[in-house]
Structure formats: structure tokens, C-alpha cells
Image (tube, rainbow, N blue to C red):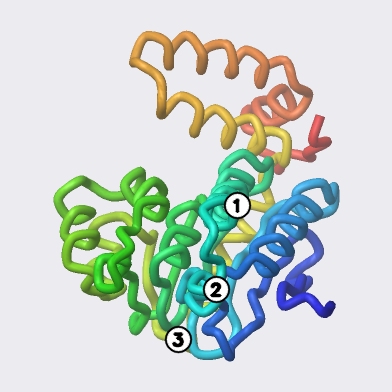
Amino acid sequence: MTSNIKIKKIDKDISSIVIDEPQTYNSLSFKNLSDLLKNLKKLDADKNIKVIILEGAGKGFSAGHNLKEVRGLKKKEKYQKLFNLCSKVMLQIIEGRKPVIAKVHGAAFAAGCQLVASCDLAYSTKEALFATPGVNIGLFCSTPMVAVSRKINRKPMMKMLLTGEPIKANYAKEISLINDCFAASKLDSEVLKVAKLIASKSNLTIKIGKQAFYKQLEMPLAKAYAYTSKMMTINMMAMDAREGISAFLEKRKPKWKNK
């Protein structure tokens, strides 16, 4: 069966994963989630790739789960399997070694909004819309709220969940769901600019830092400091840290070994 999840090389060390099923508004069906997970793991293991961009084809980013498929599942264990698989995709983004950037146009609704919130960075067009609209169909967006509520504060989160109303890109930026929004004509170049900047850093340092960032967020303050002190010590023992410090002091560009 042909996959709707496509990998596109953007630059020598940057690849894009495209959800390419416009007829279902890039729905997160069993098949698409499974292929998305597989491709995220593939790029995460690729030593030549430093940054992953995630985007949707057609009119928008993703409308979330395929409701026709969901309606046909009927059995409890099948629903559980679908939501568990979706959670695995979100965790792969967080636990993966490479930074993942969401590039959003059109709508990012329900699990599509969850996908945006799970990414390390997110940029959109000014016309993009974000929503957790499950309440409108009698299905509260419980799993999407896990990712989104870790990016935005409680009051705007609860308003999104309780009303199901979409929010515009400029407000999504204001509440920190996305980093920034641009004119549609500028989105590609602006995302690539950020991706190239990240790709110019030490891959090893980014990997250590990304892992530490998400782990310390869930810890009490004292434990977080103890953990990050340990991680900085591990980082300091790497060749790239010594090279980076030397390059800074010698006023030259660092030559990363990713070791």
C-alpha cells in the first residue's frame, strides 16, 4: 500500500516529512500515524540529518483523526490502539534526538493541533487556524490537551477545549502555541532560515540539550537543578564543548565533530 507520508530533502542536513493526503485534510488515520512514526524514527536515526520539518500537503496542516475511520472502529480495544499509536507519535517527536519544526498552513485541528504543540518549534502562515474542537462532536480533546496544555497557560487552553472555537495564528503566537506567523509567501524561507541556523550547531549538543529540556520540565526545582548539572557535566566532557569554547576565545568558527 502506498504511503501518504513523504520524506523530502530540503537541504544537505534538513529533511521534511509531508503528510500528503489532502482528500482527508491530512487526517491522522491508523496508516498515516504508523507511517509517520516510522519516518520520524528513520530520520532520527539518519546521521546526516540534523533538523526535521513537519508539514501537510494541500489546503492545510491536519484536521486530526479520520472521523470516518473512528466511527467504524466500534470496539473499545480498537479505539485504545488508535489513541495509543497517536501518543507514540507525539512521544517520538519529544524523545527523538533531532529538533522537529512544525510548518503550518490552513487548519491544525484536534490531533493536528496536538502534533503542532508536540513539535519543538512551530511556525505558521498568518491565515492558519488552531483548534481543539472535539467538544463540538461529543468527544473531548483529552489527548490533544496533553501536548497543548504544556505549551500554553490554563485559561486559554480551557477556553479552546470548552468552546471548540478555533484561534487565529497571531493569537496562537501570543499564547505561545507557535513561535511566529508569516505571510504565506514567506513561510518556507523563514522556516528554512531557522532550520539552517539550528543545523549549524553541534548535533551532539542539540541532542543532549533537547533531552534535558523536556526531562527537567517535569521535575521539582531542586531535582531539575541536580539533573541539569549532571547533563552539563556530560556535555562539558564532549569534544564539541571544548572546541566551541576554544573557538569562541580564539574568535573563529567552531569545527564540530559531533562527539
Specify whether 132 is left or right of 9.
Answer: left
Mark-to-mark CA distance, 2 and 3: 36 Å
Mark drawn on residue 184: 3
Mark drawn on residue 49: none
- Mark 1 and 3 residues: CB-CB less than 8 Å, in contact? no
Specify whether 142 is left or right of 234.
Answer: left
Mark-to-mark CA distance, 1 and 2: 14 Å
Please name whichever residue, 225 or 143, is drawn nearer the observer in this view of the structure.
Answer: 143
**Residue at position x 14%, y 50% from top?**
155
Camera-near label (1 vs 2) is 2
Q: Is residue 146 above or below residue 43?
A: above
Tag 2 or tag 1, which sits nearer the N-term?
A: 2
Neighbourhood count class around disc 3 (C-alpha, 10 Å): few under 14, some 14–19, many 20 upward? some
- Mark 1 and 2 residues: CB-CB less than 8 Å, in contact? no
**Element under disc 3:** helix
**Residue underneath mark 1:** 81
Camera-near label (1 vs 3) is 1
**Residue underneath mark 2:** 72
The answer to which quarter of the image holds residue 14 is bottom right
Q: Position of residue 41 (x, y in %)?
A: 76, 50
Tag 3 or tag 1, which sits nearer the N-term?
A: 1
Please name whichever residue, 145 or 41, is drawn nearer the observer in this view of the structure.
Answer: 145
